[in-house]
Image: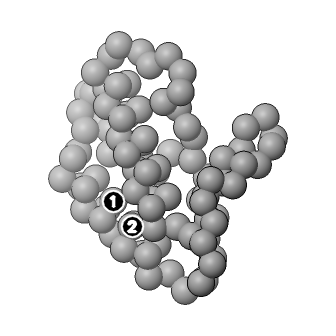
Amino acid sequence: MWLMRFFGPDDGFDEVAYLAQRRALLQALAALQGEAVLVSNEIGWGVVPLGTTSRRFVDELGWLNQAVAAVCQQVTLVACGLPLVLKQETR
């Protein structure tokens, strides 16, 4: 839902603000000394509506999830209540 704040009611997307906030988020996660739990949807596996805004949202969320996963030490996909560890690094 974090990503939704950059989409306006007129189907606009505030790319400048988004890129700045995305960069700040990724830097904060990379520098974090403690633990954080992030929860995100994986919406790119299903049918994507043809609308420009819907497609942009699906694409941006997929790229954001990839970027966050790259800086995180552990990434777990949960499907049907079953966890599947995709990435687990030790410090």
At 55% across and 37% down in the image, what residue appears? 42
Count of numbered tags: 2
Instruction: Name which residue lies at 49% across and 58% down.
Output: 69
The residue under the point 63% across, 78% down is: 90
Q: Residue furthest right?
A: 81
**Residue type at mark 2?**
Leu
Q: Is residue 21 left or right of residue 64?
A: left
The secondary element bearing badge 2 is classed as helix
Q: Quadrant of the C terminus?
A: bottom right
Residue type at the position of mark 1: Arg
Answer above or below: position of 74 versus 39. Answer: below
- Would you say 87 lies left or right of 79 here? left
Q: Are marks 2 and 1 in contact (CB under 8 Å)?
A: yes
Point out residue 88 in the picture as x, y percentages from the top left corner.
63, 66
Q: Nearer the viewer, residue 90 or 27?
A: 90
In the image, farthest residue toward the top: 50
Instruction: Give the residue number, with chain letter if any, for mark 1.
Output: 22
The residue carrying mark 2 is 26
Q: Position of residue 52 (x, y in %)?
A: 28, 21
Residue 5 appears in the picture as rendered: no
Q: Position of residue 16 (x, y in %)?
A: 18, 53
* Above or below, 46 relative to 1: above
Q: CA distance from mark 2 to mark 1?
A: 6 Å
Residue shown at the point (39%, 67%) measured from the top left: 26
Question: Toward which corner of the image does residue 34 lie, by quadrant?
Answer: bottom right
Q: Quadrant of residue 8?
A: top left
Q: Secondary structure at mark 1?
A: helix
Decide which of 79, 8 is in the foreground and name it: 79
Please state the horizontal and vertical placement of residue 18, each as a whole percent of the image.
28, 53
